[in-house]
Image (spheres, grey):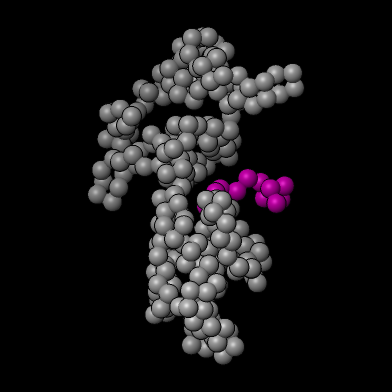
Amino acid sequence: MSRQVGSLPVHEGRMLYTTRVDPHLTSGAEVVIDVVKTALQRLEVYRRLDLTLRYLHHVLLPSQSLFVRAAFDECVRLYSANKASWLGDLIHSLRHLPMPMILPPTGLTPTVIDNVRKDLQQSMAQSLAASISGSNKLVLLQYRVERNNEGRLIFRANPQGEHVMVKNPKHRIALIRLLFSSHPLVIEHLEWAERRRQPIHHHLRLCRLCQLEVENEVHAVLTCTSHEPIVIARTRFLSQLPSLGTGIPTRSPPS
């Protein structure tokens, strides 16, 4: 598709995918729950659980087939009798997410399922933020700041920040690769084994310009002074920060 329309902005590309592609992939999607513990730790499990909850919402509607509703009622009875059931697998999976959730086994209505789906989105966001905060690669995402609803600057690990709104495709791709550690800097490049070379220890991945510190994102962009074009560009950029007003924090990021 990129050959026909070029590089789409993230928001528009996501909208196009969810409206024109995703319906074909999710129509008749399997709603059997994978209760294996390792599967419940992967991010894609949230998508599968959301599809399952959407199906359950459909089942609970008044106009549903008597056979479908009878099958679900049997699942409820099996769960109440402490026997294996589809409902039990769904409750188990939600309870064992990285950020656990509770689905009541009785009194289920479409409204209840809508609320559970909202909680699932929050659970996914919290799990994603925890993964970013615990990563040794996503330092720039861990220390990014944004304003909350009260207008105060807060540190928030958010993979869908302003960087995805950059209009220039080349700039957007370069910035996203820098933030997500998908770049040619030594800190990333020497982590992988290549032909005739084993991975290099972290403390030995020194900057190719100054040979004094590890060549990571912070060093290459903000601190290295051994390459004059970078220093000039950095100085020009920092000189423009005061014009952005109070949006730039002056305190250090949390340790």
Could you say where residue 215 lies in the image, as x and y percent from the top left? 52, 19
Determine which quarter of the picture holds residue 208: top right
In this image, 117 relative to 147: left or right? right
Could you say where residue 186 lies in the image, as x and y percent from the top left? 58, 21
Could you say where residue 130 lies in the image, as x and y percent from the top left? 42, 44
* Identity of the residue drawn at 51% across and 9% down: 210
Q: Is residue 140 above or below residue 202?
A: below
In this image, 230 relative to 65: left or right? left
Residue 230 included in the magenta stretch of the image: no
* Identity of the residue drawn at 43% across and 74% down: 105
Determine which quarter of the picture holds residue 27: bottom right
* Identity of the residue drawn at 42% across and 45% down: 129
Q: Foreground residue, 190 or 73?
A: 73
Start and end of the magenta stretch? 1-11
Q: Is residue 104 above or below residue 197?
A: below
Q: Foreground residue, 108 or 254?
A: 108
| Residue extending furthest toward the bottom | 66
